[in-house]
Image: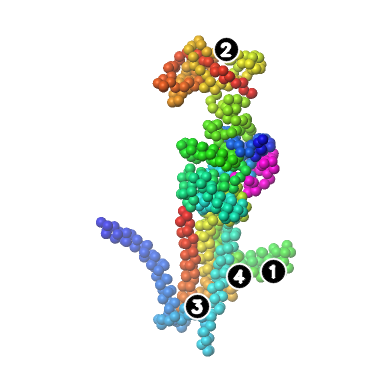
Amino acid sequence: MTTTAIEARAVTKRFGAGEITALDAVSISIAQGEFFTLLGPSGCGKTTLLRCIAGFETPTDGAILLSGSDITASPPNKRNVNTVFQSYALFPHLTVAQNIGFGLKMRGDDAAKVDKRTEEMLALVKMEQMASRRPEQLSGGQQQRVALARALAPAPEVLLLDEPLSALDLKLRKEMQSELKRLQSETGITFVFVTHDQEEALTMSDRIAVMSHGQLQQVGSPREIYTRPVNRFVADFIGETNFLEAEAKGDSVTLSTGDTLPLPGAGTGPITLAVRPELLRLTEPGEGDLTATVRDSVYFGTDWHCHLLLSDGTEVVARMQSPPTGESGIGKGQPVGLAFAPGALRVLED
Amino acid sequence: MAQSRTRTAWLLSTPALVVLFCAAAGPLMIVLVYSFLSPGEYSGVVWDPTLEAWFRVLFRRDIFDGTVSLADAHLTIFWRSVKLSLLTTLITFVIGLPTAWFIATRPARSRPLWLFLITIPFWTNLLIRTFAIMQVIRNEGILNTALLKIGLIDSPIQLLNTDTAVLIGMAYVYLPLMVLPLFAAIDRFDFRLIEAAYDLYASRWRVLRRIILPIIRPGIVAGSILVFVPSLGAYVTPRVLGGGRNMMLGNFIELQFGQGRNWPLGAALSMVLLVIVTLALLVYVRASSRDEERG
Ligand SMILES: Nc1ncnc2c1ncn2[C@@H]1O[C@H](COP(=O)(O)OP(=O)(O)OP(=O)(O)O)[C@@H](O)[C@H]1O
Ligand SMILES: [Mg+2]
């Protein structure tokens, strides 16, 4: 049985005179020990939700529960929740060790306990050598580790991370991603992680919540979100997607090109279908499910992205693995056939 | 080549050295020398080297039997000067910190206006400002009249010619000198650190004590020095608001050069004032070099 670490009940947050709705009745429950990611475009309310959980913002409406008890009204220093800030916000006048021990000291632990825990934390983030340095004597990645250790030291019930990796370069970022996963599994603390990088979200999370305009669009495991997006926004935001307009007729659909394909349980009426580029296969002209002409093809190293025009002018992208020679073997304007992998067509809810 | 470069450097710094000598070192030497001479009959000094002036800074010789005792009147003045200057520094800090904080947290657009408002008193003559304060706090002044009107007091509070009046005056006059360096420090302060500390279980008071105050300390030290040093030598404010009795060091020194007709004693007292100021500056240098070590 899993217990709930954090629960948001219809949390609404408005700013200004109420004209800016940053969160619109957001309800989620995050399980104990979960790596939970909030994903969405800039301005969708990720930071605001995190700040409501941390206690820096008070929801206009709704409630926040920590391990089942309502903490909506308690101030940040009374919540057993710590934050890793995007800017790290390390205390410049304190050493690395003093930074890490700060939360323990403020909580009232005795000096011996603070020292012991600080040493454990330094070892956990592999910063033993740097204990007496000041934050400005550290590189970005090292500051990041200290910020993590500082927030983890008091062993909070939930750790909130607001785009903690966005200031790091690509290589360091990859390193810190696996570091974060390691820290999470070693400590068993619930992580609520904010990012607008979908790859980061897919590779790191147990579950992802996709947000847009202050509303939750879909909550699910990375695979659920990627393979079964519930709406156009999620399908478009996570990975690349081709959208096809169609008319559903029971167990088959008629595409805008006039081709009819079998699709059990499609329903009736106009629908939108989503197809991932990697589930489309190029065939000889005349074979496959549809006919198309090549508009352009772009080399990405591991694969080719082929931009195709269907007979009614709809543009779709197909992804095909690069052969050893790297040649795609197709040219502009060439007619091709297009085949859907089994189960590739997904009906979107709206 | 190297030699001519050195000579050019010396030539170039000559004007600065001349100014430094004429304006600072020279007068200082004169004061120092005067403190070892004897007072002239009506004023000035006569060339008769003695340690009498330095002796009289701290001790008193009875005119009749020649017994020596501590000059407690002088000690009282020293003590009052240091006490009032420290209190002035404290008061300007307590008022100046929220003021500077307020200005630093205004939108960038309106900050120059607030800073300008703070410095307005600077554009007015000190004597006029001090007389204005006098009008406010004297027995028939605005403050007492208002308090009487609303019935908070039955008879006027005697403020004029007390230490309190001197304190009010000095705090008013030197407040901008505290606010400006505090503002500069708070302006550079990263407000996200407050949230970080608050998040790590620190109460509001501890956020202030452990995070804000240590980080803006250079501004606190600079402001304190800027207020303490001129307070110590203040002349106009204690004279106008403190009356003749509540003298501070500045007034006492003036007295020696004027009615007292004891220039050597005045010179020795000036040197004492200089020593106290130098000690205060040393504290400042030590405090700020400790900041440098931290980076
Ligand atoms: N203090 C505030 N006052 C007014 N509006 C605010 C405030 N904080 C956030 N907002 C608004 O609320 C919305 C959500 O902001 P939020 O910072 O939560 O977005 P975000 O998803 O974290 O974006 P990003 O990825 O850019 O960090 C935005 O439209 C933002 O302008
Ligand atoms: Mg944000």
- Counting from the top left corner in percent of width and height, residue A150 is at 55, 47
Name the residue carrying label 2. Answer: A259
Identify which residue is drawn at 46% across, 20% down.
A296
Tag 1 or tag 4, which sits nearer the N-term?
1
- Badge 4 is on which residue? B163
Q: Amino acid at mark 3?
A: Val
Q: Amino acid at mark 1?
A: Pro
- Residue name at image x 44 percent, y 26 percent: A301
Helix, strand or loop at label 4? It is helix
Is A202 drawn above or below residue B49 in the view shown? above
In the rendered structure, which segment of residues is drawn in magenta? A56-82
Local secondary structure at mark 1: loop
Look at the numbered discs 4 and 1 and tell me whether their residues touch, using CB distance below 8 Å. no
Same-subunit check for callouts 4 and 2: no
Q: How many marks?
A: 4
State which mark lies toward you, 3 or 4: 3
